[in-house]
Image (tube, rainbow, N blue to C red):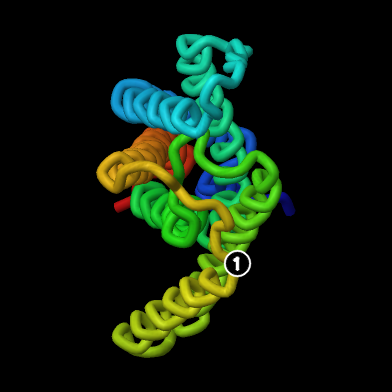
Amino acid sequence: MSAPPEAADTSRTAHAPARTGGSPVLPLLGRGMVAGALGGLAAGLFSLLLAEPLMDKAIRAEEARSHEHEPAGGAVQHHEELFSRSTQHAGLVIALVVAGLAIGVLFAVAYALVHRRDPRGNPWPRALAFCAAAFCAVSLFPALRYPAAPPGVGDAGTVGDRQEMWLGAVVIGVLGMFLVWQVYVRLAARPVPVRQCAVAVTAVAVLALLWALPDNPDPVPVSATLLWDFRMLSLASHVLLWAVFAGVFGGLGLRALRTREPVTAGAAGYGSTAPVS
């Protein structure tokens, strides 16, 4: 004997929330790219308005030092820049937008992997926590070990070594944040103070491991005030990028969640019958 149509509809809709609760990867990728582009644009405009004047000042100081060290009566050779400063300014904004798009794709993939463990989680606090961890791993920890230096500072022969050291700091930061998250998850049954202390000790150990990397081989012959301002503005641009990214990614997640709720509620109510007195 076949089941009544009402029972068949109820059995089909009973699993509807489970199907609609998950978030596909493609929408997450689109959300990450939008958030990354806007975050990169905000960081690029911030750097263009505040950091670039300091860069121009550092370039002028470097040119003045090179003129001071020229031999007396020697021929001065001036090399024309390949790109003008205005072109470099536009390239800075475009480069940060492209970097934001790449960050958005990687972030969306990592978010999707964790999203599978708890598909019904609130997207807003999760986006904030993810972005905070990503900021520490990619921006803060490497900046503490290898602070940013103005352009034109350092030997051209050590550029490859400096890039490798910075990349090593990023890898240690990313793996360290993953280790911190694993410690937090595996100690879920322990009291909250124990979890927090374990997470703090793990983060300190990651920072200590960063100082095992070699020091920057090049001195930074600029004024302390200029160097401090440049490094603070560079770090502030990273903070702005991740703050905008977190707000846009989390906001789009809340919007997607609100659009799914009416569909889920309608699917759950379809086929229901009024009670018989």
Quickly name the residue at label 1.
214
Q: Nearer the viewer, residue 158 or 172?
A: 158
Q: Residue at x 46, y 10 (%)?
A: 86
Quadrant hosting residue 200: bottom left
Question: Is residue 32 rendered to the left or right of residue 105?
Answer: left
Q: Report if residue 7 is visible in the image.
A: no
Quadrant hosting residue 149: top left
- How crowded pointer 1 is (Cα within 10 Å; few <14, some 14-19, many 20+) is rated as few
The amino acid beneath tag 1 is Pro
- Residue placed farthest to the left in the image? 225
Q: Residue at x 39, y 55 (%)?
A: 132
Q: Relative to residue 181, is residue 89 depicted above or below?
A: above
Question: Is residue 184 rendered to the left or right of residue 109?
Answer: left
Residue 108: give x, y in percent of width and height.
Answer: 57, 43
Residue 73: give x, y in percent of width and height.
Answer: 54, 20
Q: Relative to residue 102, is residue 38 depicted above or below?
A: above
